[in-house]
Image (cartoon, helix red, strand yellow):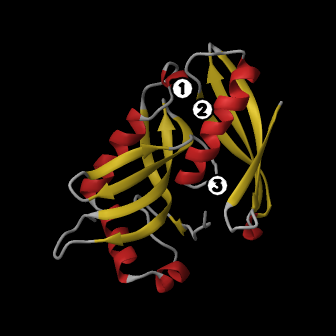
Amino acid sequence: MRWLLVGIGVAAGILPAAAQQQRNSAEVQKLGEFVRSREHLAQVGAAITAFEPAALAARCADVKPVRGRAWQPLEEPVFAPGARAPKLAEWQETWEVTACGQPGVRSVGFRAREGQGIVPLPMFPGESLATLRLQLDAGQLALTNFASSALRCDSRMQVIGSVVTNRGEQAQGRWSERWTVAGCDRVADIDVRFSPGPSGQTTYEFRTR
């Protein structure tokens, strides 16, 4: 899984950094324009509200995006002639939010497929550097193999927070995070260490606290 360059958000929208913009294809730049559009910002707000983990929503259901922090294309987008929205694309966005007046960070993914429109995809709350696909793969393993024993829980479990604990070698594809998981009215932390694998894919290791 490739680690992609992330654009830095400014003001109320999300803009790629100038250096990234120079390297982007015309299609990626067009996707950036769509990401900043008013119609898409409405999708973002709805997705962030819909994907708020139950354990967090029980304490505060009023979660609102405030400022775009970053966006990241995960595959080359494709646009039909004259269309503003992509017909094929996958990307993720990170937003600064307020939750009942308290600041926070939420990420959300989006996938566009012809005939299906644009579908939002949940990501972990917090500062995780893992991409959408990496969160899906590593998160499922963490919840299935580690969270259930740490929480002593067999019912629904969710990742409700993520922090980066070591980013010193992020440029080399090595970094560490701590994921907070919740289930059965309990919370626990799982440490995750990411590193580059021999085939170019990111590998990960877990440790419960």
119 with respect to 204 (left or right)? left
Instruction: Decide: few, some or many residues near mark 2? Use Cα within 10 Å; few <14, some 14-19, many ≥20.
Output: many
Residue 171's image quarter? Answer: bottom right
Real-space Cα separation, disc 2 to disc 1, in angstroms: 7 Å
- Ranked by sequence position, the earlier of labels 2 and 1 is 1
The disc label shown at residue 38, or none:
none
130 with respect to 81 (left or right)? right
Q: Secondary structure at mark 2?
A: strand
User: Residue 66: horizontal and vertical position, in percent?
Assistant: 44, 48
Q: Which residue is tagged 2? A: 160
What kind of residue is marked 2?
A: Ile
Taking the view exactly as shown, the residue that stands out farthest to the front is 199
Q: Nearer the viewer, residue 13 or 195?
A: 195
What kind of residue is marked 3?
A: Leu
| Placement of the C terminus among the 4 image quadrants | top right
User: Residue 68: horizontal and vertical position, in percent?
Assistant: 46, 56
Q: Secondary structure at mark 3?
A: loop
Residue 8 seen: yes
- Residue at 60% over, 37% down: 140
Instruction: Decide: few, some or many residues near mark 3? Use Cα within 10 Å; few <14, some 14-19, many ≥20.
Output: some
Q: Which residue is tagged 3? A: 129
User: Residue 129: horizontal and vertical position, in percent?
Assistant: 64, 55
- Residue at 20% over, 72% down: 80
Q: Which residue is tagged 1? A: 56
Marks 1 and 2: in contact by CB < 8 Å?
yes
- Residue at 76% over, 70% down: 172
Taking the view exactly as shown, the residue that stands out farthest to the bottom is 22
What kind of residue is marked 1?
A: Leu
- Ranked by sequence position, the earlier of labels 1 and 3 is 1
Instruction: Decide: few, some or many residues near mark 1? Use Cα within 10 Å; few <14, some 14-19, many ≥20.
Output: some
- Residue at 56% over, 40% down: 103
Residue 36 seen: no
